[in-house]
Image (tube, rainbow, N blue to C red):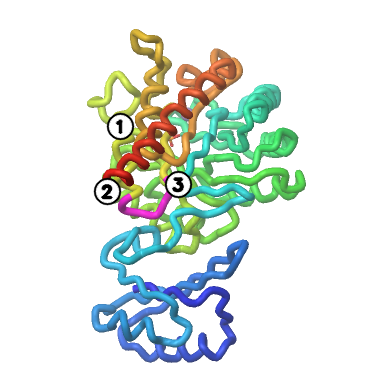
Amino acid sequence: MILILKPDIEADSREYKDLMAHLDALENIQISVHREVGTQQVLTEVYLVGNTSQLSTEDMASLPGVERVVRVSEAYRVLGRHRDDNRPTSFTYNGLHFGQDNLHIFAGLCAVDNRKHVELMMKALQAHGLQCTRMGAYKPRTNPYSFQGHGKECLPYVFELAGKYGIKVIAMEITHEAHIDEIKAALEQTGNPTGIMLQIGTRNTQNFELLKKVGRQQEFPVLLKRGFGITLEESLNAAEYLASEGNRKVIFGLRGMKTNMGDPHRNFVDFAHVPVIKRLTRMPVCIDPSHSVGSRDADPDGILDIMHVIAQGVIAGANMILVDFHPVPSKALVDGPQALTLEELPYFLEDVHIARRAYEDRVSLIRRSKA
Ligand code: PEP
Ligand code: MN
């Protein structure tokens, strides 16, 4: 059960103290308090865990300081959508709104290779009015002899260039908690020119200790990729790990499932799950067409499979696209064969726009037909 308290309630107020005294006296109930400091107000939620079936919703709603009560029936206590649950399905980070109601494009390098390519990429993004990108510094590779990413060495120039080209959020995978400190140090060193969305890759979806560490910090939002060989439920529970530790600025990323049933695609594309995740949880949903499809194969009309699956995800309501681009894909150190080129960027944006408009039309249509 979640008690949503009146906005801006102070921990030393009479109301709050009376409420806590009452809750402390409940038997077999554990209490945890979550405070979310927003730009407008501070929201306080009190989680009651244990034998909550003995508690009446009405009684709890009448306690001092309580505005609303949400009874949580199942899993995904924090991130789930529950009955009578009108908690937000969005968050703001570095001035950008991320929600189930809008769409962000994170086009960029799978792996940072050199300064020149980072600059060409970011310059192109700025020229097209984009403020987000992806930049891989820590690369989890199947083969130990493959390029492992430049790690912390590249962070200062990546962040400086982001500042120069107006990039507000960089999605960056981390594979170890130490990477969070390296990112923080590099941001500080360069004067905080940009924001970072920490990405948990598919190989770490169930790395629970990493999830707990990332969940305990609230500075950076998190993009959690679905595990490539586990159920959707298991991956959503992984997201809940982040939130249960305190960080609820979480975006859930679909990137395809590892099975040869998806051949000839690199992974079996799972974007039909976009609406499922939006129904079960309050998380914005990201699609990664590059790692799902894994090639630049095209249909007889010339439309790339990557573009088709983007359209499929966006027309189903996806809120973020994480997509590999490279100025010279033949020189990319990781995943060049699936990268789109900078020349394709305007075409890509127009195609995404068509799919997004179609999604919005579909939403209007269902509203009209229900009215
Ligand atoms: C990536 O986005 O660079 C990546 C490695 O993705 P995934 O974890 O989905 O394989
Ligand atoms: Mn990759």
Q: What range is drawn magenta here?
A: 279-284
Comparing marks 1 and 2, which lies closer to the viewer? 2
Q: CA distance from mark 1 to mark 2?
A: 39 Å
Q: Which residue is mark 2?
A: 370
Q: Which residue is mark 3?
A: 101
Q: Does residue 162 appear in this view?
A: yes
Mark 1 and mark 2 residues within 8 Å of each other at the beta carbon: no
Q: Earlier in the sequence, mark 1 or mark 2?
A: 1
Q: Main SS type for the magenta part?
A: loop
Residue drawn where x is 45% and y is 47% of the image:
101
Q: Nearer the viewer, residue 91 or 224?
A: 91
Residue 171: x and y, percent? Answer: 55, 40
Residue kind at label 3, given as amino acid type: Asp
Q: Which mark is residue 258?
A: 1
Label 2 Cα crowd, 10 Å radius (few <14 / some 14-19 / many 20+): few
Magenta stretch: residue 72 in it?
no
Q: Which tag, 3 or 2, sits closer to the chain's start? A: 3
Q: Is residue 298 above or below residue 358?
A: above
Q: Residue at x 59, y 47 (%)?
A: 96
Q: CA distance from mark 1 to mark 3?
A: 29 Å
- Report the side of 335 relative to 41 (left or right): left
Mark 3 close to ligand 1, CB under 8 Å: no
Spatial CA distance of label 3 from label 2 is 19 Å
